[in-house]
Image (cartoon, rainbow, N blue to C red):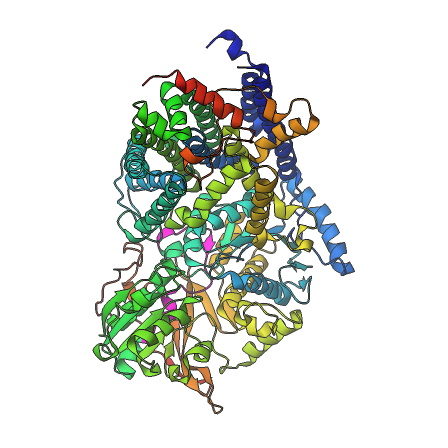
């Protein structure tokens, strides 16, 4: 990477943002850091895997929360020495971490292999089935969980203080953000985006389409597992309800709120979701118009509806729209930019059949096609 | 990369930075600067503006606690309540806050801020010069994750120093674990009936002034085996901690006196189609009876599935825990009469004592109506809600708090002293005395009832026996060294139960001893 690229405004802002977040604990309350921001970073990490699969692979996955949960269950079973539930293997924390990540990656590899030959709505439904099966697996298989889940899970000693979990989440989020963007510029990432846009064409060029999808799903599963470890350390317990259909959809909603074609959107969506859950009901007079804590899901539903209608690219996408409204540079005419930020694919349409026209992401899609033409397997 | 693309990315990241910074400042500032009593009567329980007195007291409350907090004196009870506004028991949200409000109205001079809802909070609650302020109401949905988020909000954001709740079994375990990690905050269980919070977790700042689900079935074995002649029984129970605990109590009791549990079936909580689970039960001619621990909306659905699969119900072949109620007759017909029902904190309406009448009347004086769970969320007589266990569990916790505050002369600056006082409290409540065992769990009197036909041919509950002094160990069947109740535990074995033969019969609503 050249010095010029390192000094790009986007990178400078990214570093500045990290700096702000690093010193945030000095200026805000413990609750805001240890609850709101730590949860934001964890959910953002998990949601970023949805964005990754969607942006680069054209795969909308509903299995990410399952993988998030698998890591938590595995860590709990491995690390606890005693307790009412679980295997209570009593392994050292770092061994348990490696075990949990190995298991979640293996599970993701297996599930990815099974799902790699499906696209669009079929992939979505298959991953939904994964989530449902996972919920019932942990609810029914008592030795590893049972309906009550695994409780009394403590983080490794290194992460004992709650604020350390925040910093762990921050560092991991930064690494994953940079890493996912970097993957988009690698031969693997470029091939994956080519498969997203035209799998038949890529297969005819000699690329192994299912293998690329499977590996992408595994990488996303590994990262979701990291988020799941943070979550189980933060929450102290995990049970099947943690990975039921409701939270599964919430993770997708978080990605949609922030912008499912922008990695930044994963964390922004998570922040909006967590902040709304915590602070919306504290606003003056909202209870007078019927917005009580019991109506939170309705509020989130309306928010998602508005975003879907007004800005399909989520909150991050609003910036581009505002720029278009201001007329400085119409979105459709902006110069072509190669990956990493690639268009979202409609889950209901097969990737090969998707209409590339008349969206703000059209230009980038074309650019990728052009890029891929020069990439031999 | 073009300059336009760079600007686009820059704008996106900048917008992220701006939004985060603005929201962080706003939210964080709110937390840090929030005075302890700022949410007097709650943000979600803000004072009724039409009530001048309440508004005046709220204003006062907003001013004073900040000084206490700033000085570190902290001699105000900042009470958080963990309610249940969603999930299978979401209809009982009013009951949870109502129970605490009534306890404070009766014992601390509180006035409800609304004549028709407890969720608007109270004003004027004071014990030994210490005011009790409602800082917030948590919204549970029967899942541990949600209740953990809510209790953290109450304690870490709203600065609650005492929490009453939660309502449900799995939630109770999660909150007890949280209590163990936060010893300076005092927790009083609402009506969470799982066994583990006290017997396994044993947080020293978690107090349960009610029974667990197992205790509420104590004495059922004696009645069904020794009196009704049941030798074999099939158990169907919700597959979660309360279902396990409730079934465990019945199994320990029934097997303890010599009965045999031949089948155990555990449908997941929230099941709507019970047909596959009912098919796993033996036929009526293969077993003497069935014991049902299926709650919420599942009770009726499960029994209807039984009728479809096994034939008509006959009340003398069925029994259940607290979820069996006369309302089932509306769908299942009067043949449900004859079924025995376990206890649940209160007693059926046929038992009336001056203390019970006074308690129920005080509820009617506090509110004009309440939309409690017992009236399916529709406005009804407050005494109807007060007579049901969910409301009464929270009421018991509120009474315990008032008594403990009196014991420490209103000084809550030392949490350990308050907790020590709570552990010594014996509550003389309208439905019986409650004391605590060494694990801070209630030792209670359990009222068992039966569904019977009244003179008008309607199915009603009738109290048949009161089992005094039931604790959660069942004479040693359960301890901190035994596994938590589960699908397989306890095993069906005979045991010496301390209350066998000691049940007080009740005839015509009058205990015979």
Residue shown at 48% from the left, 65% from the top: B426
Residue nearer the viewer, B335 or B168: B335
* Chief SS of the magenta region: loop
Q: Is residue B144 above or below residue B476?
A: above
The quadrant holding residue B115 is bottom right
Residue shown at 37% from the left, 70% from the top: B302
Residue shown at 49% from the left, 74% from the top: B431
Q: Is residue A26 visible?
A: no
Q: Position of residue B11 (x, y in %)?
A: 61, 23
Q: In the rendered view, does A211 fall on the left or right side of A3?
A: left
Q: Position of residue B3 (x, y in %)?
A: 59, 15
Which contiguous range is marked in magenta? B200-220
Q: In the rendered view, does B465 fall on the left or right side of B94?
A: left
Residue lying farthest bottom?
A: B455
> Would you say residue A290 sits in the magenta stretch?
no
The quadrant holding residue A107 is top left
Q: Position of residue B354 (x, y in %)?
A: 56, 80
Residue nearer the viewer, B216 or B240: B240
Q: Is residue A41 above or below residue B278?
A: above
> Would you say residue B210 sits in the magenta stretch?
yes
Q: In the rendered view, does B260 fall on the left or right side of B30?
A: left
């Amino acid at each position: 990477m050249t010095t010029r690229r390192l000094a790009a405004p986007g990178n400078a802002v990214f570093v500045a943002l990290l700096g702000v977040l690093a010193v945030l604990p000095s200026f805000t309350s413990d609750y805001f850091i240890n609850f709101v921001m730590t949860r934001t970073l964890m959910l953002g990490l998990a949601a970023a895997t949805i964005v990754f699969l969607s942006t680069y692979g054209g795969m909308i996955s509903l299995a990410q929360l399952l993988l998030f949960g698998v890591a938590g269950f595995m860590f709990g079973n491995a690390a606890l020495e005693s307790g009412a539930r679980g295997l209570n293997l009593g392994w050292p924390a770092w061994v348990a971490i490696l075990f949990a990540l190995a298991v979640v990656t293996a599970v993701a590899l297996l599930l990815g292999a099974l799902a790699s030959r499906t696209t669009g709505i079929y992939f979505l439904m298959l991953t939904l089935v994964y989530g449902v099966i996972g919920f019932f697996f942990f609810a029914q298989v008592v030795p590893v969980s049972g309906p009550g889940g695994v409780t009394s899970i403590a983080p490794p000693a290194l992460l004992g203080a709650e604020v350390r979990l925040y910093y762990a989440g921050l560092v991991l989020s930064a690494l994953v953000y940079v890493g996912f963007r970097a993957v988009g510029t690698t031969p693997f990432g470029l091939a994956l985006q080519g498969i997203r846009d035209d799998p038949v064409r890529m297969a005819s060029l000699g690329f192994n389409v299912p293998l690329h999808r499977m590996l992408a799903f595994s990488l996303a599963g590994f990262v979701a597992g990291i988020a799941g470890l943070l979550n189980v350390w933060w929450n102290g317990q995990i049970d099947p309800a943690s990975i039921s259909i409701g939270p599964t959809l919430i993770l997708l909603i978080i990605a949609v709120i922030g912008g499912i074609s922008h990695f930044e959107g994963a964390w922004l969506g998570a922040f909006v979701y967590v902040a709304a859950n915590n602070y919306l009901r504290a606003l003056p007079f909202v209870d007078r118009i019927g917005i009580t804590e019991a109506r939170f899901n309705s509020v989130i539903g309306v928010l998602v509806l508005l975003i879907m209608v007004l800005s399909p690219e989520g909150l991050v996408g609003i910036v581009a729209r505002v720029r278009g409204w201001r007329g400085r540079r119409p979105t459709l005419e902006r110069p072509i930019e190669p990956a990493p930020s690639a268009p979202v694919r409609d889950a209901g349409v097969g990737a090969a059949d998707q209409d590339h026209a008349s969206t703000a992401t059209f230009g980038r899609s074309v650019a990728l096609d052009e890029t891929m033409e020069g990439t031999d397997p | 990369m073009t300059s336009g693309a760079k600007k686009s990315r820059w704008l996106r990241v900048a917008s992220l930075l701006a939004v985060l910074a603005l929201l962080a400042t706003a939210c964080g500032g709110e937390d840090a600067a929030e005075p302890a009593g700022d949410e007097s009567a709650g943000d979600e329980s803000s004072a009724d503006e039409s009530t001048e007195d309440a508004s005046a007291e709220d204003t006062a409350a907003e001013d004073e606690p900040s000084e206490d907090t700033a000085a570190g004196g902290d001699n105000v009870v900042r009470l958080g309540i963990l309610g249940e506004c969603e999930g299978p028991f979401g209809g009982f949200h009013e009951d949870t806050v109502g129970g605490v409000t009534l306890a404070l109205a009766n014992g601390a001079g509180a006035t409800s801020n609304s004549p028709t809802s407890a969720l608007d909070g109270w004003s004027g609650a004071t014990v030994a010069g210490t005011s009790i302020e409602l800082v917030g109401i948590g919204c549970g949905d029967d899942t541990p994750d949600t209740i953990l988020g809510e209790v953290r909000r109450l304690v870490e954001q709203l600065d609650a120093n005492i929490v009453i709740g939660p309502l449900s079994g799995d939630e109770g375990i999660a909150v007890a674990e949280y209590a163990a990690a936060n010893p300076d905050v005092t927790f009083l269980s609402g009506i969470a009936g799982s066994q583990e919070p006290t017997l396994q977790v044993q947080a020293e700042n978690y107090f349960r002034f009610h029974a667990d689900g197992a205790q509420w079935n104590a004495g059922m074995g004696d009645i069904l085996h020794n009196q009704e002649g049941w030798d074999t029984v099939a158990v169907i129970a919700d597959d979660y901690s309360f279902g396990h605990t409730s079934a465990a109590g019945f199994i320990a009791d029934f097997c303890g006196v010599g009965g045999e549990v031949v089948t155990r079936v555990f449908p997941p909580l929230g099941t709507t189609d019970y047909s596959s689970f009912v098919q796993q039960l033996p036929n009526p001619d293969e077993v003497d009876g069935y014991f049902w621990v299926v709650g919420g909306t599942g009770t009726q659905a499960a029994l209807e599935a039984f009728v479809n699969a096994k034939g008509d119900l006959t009340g003398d072949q069925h029994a259940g825990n607290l979820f069996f109620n006369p309302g089932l007759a509306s769908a299942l017909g009067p043949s449900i009469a004859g079924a025995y029902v376990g206890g649940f904190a209160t007693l059926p309406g046929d038992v009336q004592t001056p203390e019970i009448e006074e308690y129920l009347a005080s509820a009617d004086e506090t509110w004009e109506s309440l939309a409690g769970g017992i009236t399916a969320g529709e406005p009804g007589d407050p005494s109807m809600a007060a007579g049901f266990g969910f409301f009464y569990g929270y009421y018991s916790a509120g009474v315990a708090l008032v008594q403990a505050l009196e014991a420490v002369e209103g000084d809550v600056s030392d949490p350990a002293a308050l907790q020590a006082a709570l552990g010594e409290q014996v509550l003389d409540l309208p439905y019986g005395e409650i004391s605590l065992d060494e694990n801070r769990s209630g030792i209670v009197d359990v009222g068992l009832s039966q569904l019977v036909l009244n003179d008008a041919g309607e199915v009603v509950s009738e109290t048949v026996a009161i089992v005094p002094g039931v604790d959660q160990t069942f004479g040693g069947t359960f301890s901190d060294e035994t596994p938590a109740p589960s699908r397989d535990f306890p095993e069906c074995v005979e045991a010496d139960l301390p209350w066998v033969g000691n049940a007080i019969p009740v005839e015509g609503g009058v205990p015979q001893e």
